[in-house]
Structures are given as structure tokens and as C-alpha cells.
Amino acid sequence: MEKYFKITEVRDRGWKGSFLSTLFYLFFSLVLLALTVPDSFAQTGRGKAESLIKESAVLSEDGNIDKAIEVCKEAVKADPDYAEAHDQLGQMLLRKGKYDEAISSFNSGLKINPRLRSAKTGIGFALLKKGDLKGAETVLKEALMLNPYPSTAHYALGLVYEKLNDYDKAVNQFKEGIQKYKSGKK
Amino acid sequence: MKISNGKEKILVLQAIAFFIIVVVSFTCSATAQALLQSGDKASDFSLKDMQGKEVSLSQFSQKKAVAIVFWSSWSANSPKALKRFEEFYKNYKDKGIQVIGINADNQTISEEDMGKISKLTKELDITFPILLDKNLKTFHEYNIIALPSIMVVTEGKISYELPGFPLVGTEDMFDFLRVQSGEAPRKQMEAKYKPRHDAIADASLARQFVKKKMYTMAYPLFLKAIEKDGKYILPYIELARLYELEGKKLEAEETLRKVLLVEPNSVVILSELGYFLSKAGKTKEAIEVLSKAVKMNSYTPAHYYYAYALAKDGKFKESLAAFDESILLNPFDSMIYSLRGEVYEKNSMLKEASSDYKKALELILKIKN
């Protein structure tokens, strides 16, 4: 490593020289990385799944949920062990109103990665939409224990309490969500 | 000076880290800079017009000035602003002035919204491009705080900003545009103040440290920015916020009072001071300060801070009316609902409080319903 960075030669050139050389090597390495890594990575199932997930996010932003679901299904096919692909499919199905399918997709993601932070919140949302408020409350509380970025889970739990006409608890959850977001825990 | 290899490596890494922070600080958009963005680089955007054609800011880079009008069909002053700009555009489009209207009716434009937008622009016979801001991305990038709002861009930088379409200030803005077109101003114009570049750089770097919660690094940089340019009000305000965040209330108040002496008529300072005083329980003075700010122009925070102060003073009905005013100016500002939620909560109206906090969180998380 030292040979690669030629530290001794760098020192001889003085501070400015060493700084510029380091920047040059850094830039050179990044260019090399950018030229070589993405191509080989994209050829793997994981690379393909990731790029499909990005595509589905754009489609979803454009309001094209049906197409986004199709693309997510392709992502799951490309890499069935990729938990995020199942999660993204769950999110799209949730938006489409297919709550049972969404729950099943979230569960597939959780089987691969039991700490998948948004899948539990997703299940909570789906149960809430199905009217299973108690079930949603339980899952969302679990999500809050798992999730380091809990604002969305607080939001969903707030919705559950609002539906249960427990406004005191709803207020607390929404406020907590706002506060956590502002403190950087999104 | 002899430095060991290990130390040298650390120094090089530190220098790179510093370099990256400096670069990032210049490229990140500052969220707290609403109304204080003059001199900042204008973010380029590419949005679709009503016919689906992409229009970008950069395609007008050869123009002497571009006036961007953020508007909505539901805001009372927007038709007035569009009409006035259409008249202006007809006379000045051949003199290097471009006008662009950016609609901000909703996060997602429904068919009903499209109908309203189309009807209004036809009625007003608008000939300049009307663009649709999907997800209000450009609206947020430009830190818009009221509708309508006008941003003037010259040489790629924001050179004038006008929230609302107030009686006072609007003519000055048109005068500014006339000057850009090469005409003489109708009245004597004061030279526009521009903060010193090195002060902007220090404040910007300090802001990055605040974001990273490296407060001890931020303090000296804010103070340096103030020392370099005593008229540059942004570092005062952000320093006061930092003091408050760290529980140094006395220092926060002192800083705000100090900057008020520098710019006694700044709506931003009056609003910040008023809000601070409300929270500190000095409600009478807060109301006095904020009522002055509210009368000055359509700066939305002035209106909701005023509403909050009124509620703290027990004037609940007046408070709700003032909150309604601020919603009319900018319904996408989450702070309105957060503060009104707090007011409802204090008055034991939990259902209403819950609804407002929910709305605030939806806006923060950009949740669409």
C-alpha cells in the first residue's frame, strides 16, 4: 500500500505536492472503479434487481403503479434472495390496495432479513388498511423496536390510534414522528 | 518539519475530509435560507409545460433576467400576479426578460387541478410558459414560503426574491427587472446589498457542522461570518437557533436583538425574535414584534408565529384566524400545522390536535393521500 501511494516520494515534494498527488491518486482510483465495477456488477442478479428497483421507484413517482409492480416482480425474479426487492414489491402492492399480497411480499422480505426496517411498517400499514387495528398496533410497535428511522412507523401508529378514537395516543405518536425526523431519525 | 508516515497519512486524510466538507457546503441547498437567498446559485430545473413539453431554466441562460412566478389556482393573489406579469412580459420579452410560471397547486396534479390551471391561464391569456411542478420539487428547492412568490434569476444566481405579491415591494421588483432590461429605474434605487463571499462560505460551512451535530465547530464559524460581514443576517439567525438548541437562551435572545439593530425592518429577524419571545413566555412583546412583521409582507412564518403568540396570550379565536391566513399563503409549510396542533393540544382539543400533527408529519415525510 505504501509503495502504491509512494509516501516517501510524496514527502520529498513538500506538503502541496503530497496533497495534490493524493488527490490525483484518489481521482484516478475512483475513475477506474467507476469504469470497471458497475458493468460487472450489473450482470449479476443483485445488480439487475437493484436497477429494477430504482426503475420501479421512478415509475411509482410517475403514478404508474401497475408497471412498477411488474418491474418489482422482475426484480424479485432476478434475485429472489434480495430482501429489499420483496419489500419494494410490498410497498407497490400496498399503494395499489392489494393488502394481502403486500403482506405476503413483506413477509418474504422479512424471512430473508428479519430486521428489514420498512417491511414491518409496511405490514402495519396493510393491516391498518384492512381494518385490523389491533394487529396493526402490535406489528407497528415491533417495527418501532426494530427501526432506527421510525418516523413513518410513528405516523402509521398514529393513524391506528386515530381510528381507535384514542386521540391522546395519536397525538403522541404524530408528535414523536415529527420530533424524531427533526432530530435526524427519519 | 519532519512528520512521520502515519501522521502524514492522517494529515492528508484530514485535508481531503476538509476539502470534501467545503465542496459539499457550497453545493448543498440551504433550507433555512428562505428570503435570504439573494446571491445563491439558482438550481436548474426541467419541468413539463401544460402540453407536456420539457422546459428548463438553463435554456434561458442567455436572457438578461428570468422571473420565476410560483403560483397556485387557489391562492387569492396568484391571478393578480400572473396578470401583471403577462402585461410586463408582453412589453419586455424582446428586451431580454423571460417570465416562467411554476404551478404549485398540489403535490400531485389531478385532472381537476389541471382543469383549474388551464381555465385560469386561458382566462388571463398567459403567453409565457406555465410549468407543472411534480411533487413540488422545485417549490421546495427554492425554499418557497408563500404563494405567489417571485424569484428573479440573473447570470445563474438568485438576484431578487419576493414572497407574496404585496403592495409594498412589488413595484420595486418590477423596477429591478426594468433595470436588468437596460432601462433606467422609475425611481432612485438603492444599491442592493450582497453579503461578502467569505462570510457566506463561513456560514455555509457552519451550517454543515450544525447538520452533523458538530456544534463546537459551528459556533466560531458563525461568529467569523458575522465579524466579516456585520450586515449579513443569516449567520446571526442560525447562531441564535444554535444557542437555543443548546439551551443558551440568553445568548440566543441577545443575538436576535443585536441583529435587529442591524436590520430593524427585516421581516425574517422580527419573525424569529417574535417566535423566540413567545416560547420564552414574553407574549406581549412577541405580539408587538410579530404584528409589525405580519404587516410588512407575506412572509408565511411571520403569520404563523403571530398566530402562535396570540394563542399563548389566550386569544384563541384570533390565533386560529391568523393560522388560516398562513395556510392561505403556503399550505405546504409543516410548521403551521405543528404549531396549530400545539395550540389545539393546549386547549384540550385532541382530535383537532391529532389531525394537525398528522398533517405536519405527512408534509415532512412527503406522504401523499
Image (cartoon, coloured by chain):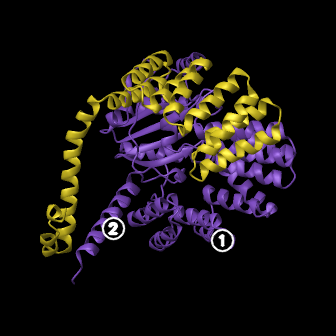
Which of B270 and B323 lies nearest the eye of the viewer? B323
In the rendered image of the structure, the colour used to display chain B is: purple
Q: Which mark is residue B248?
A: 1
Question: Which quadrant is home to the N terminus of chain A?
Answer: bottom left
Q: Amino acid at mark 1?
A: Lys
Chain at tag 1: B
Residue depicted at 49% across the width and 36% down the height: B137
Residue depicted at 24% across the width and 40% down the height: A37
Chain letter matching colour yellow:
A
- Taking the image as drawn, is residue B128 in sight? no
Q: Are marks 1 and 2 in contact (CB under 8 Å)?
A: no
- Taking the image as drawn, is residue A137 in sight? yes
Query: Which residue is denoted by mark 2 in the rendering?
Result: B14
Residue depicted at 45% across the width and 28% down the height: A85
Q: Amino acid at mark 2?
A: Gln
Q: As drawn, is B196 to the left or to the right of B361?
A: left
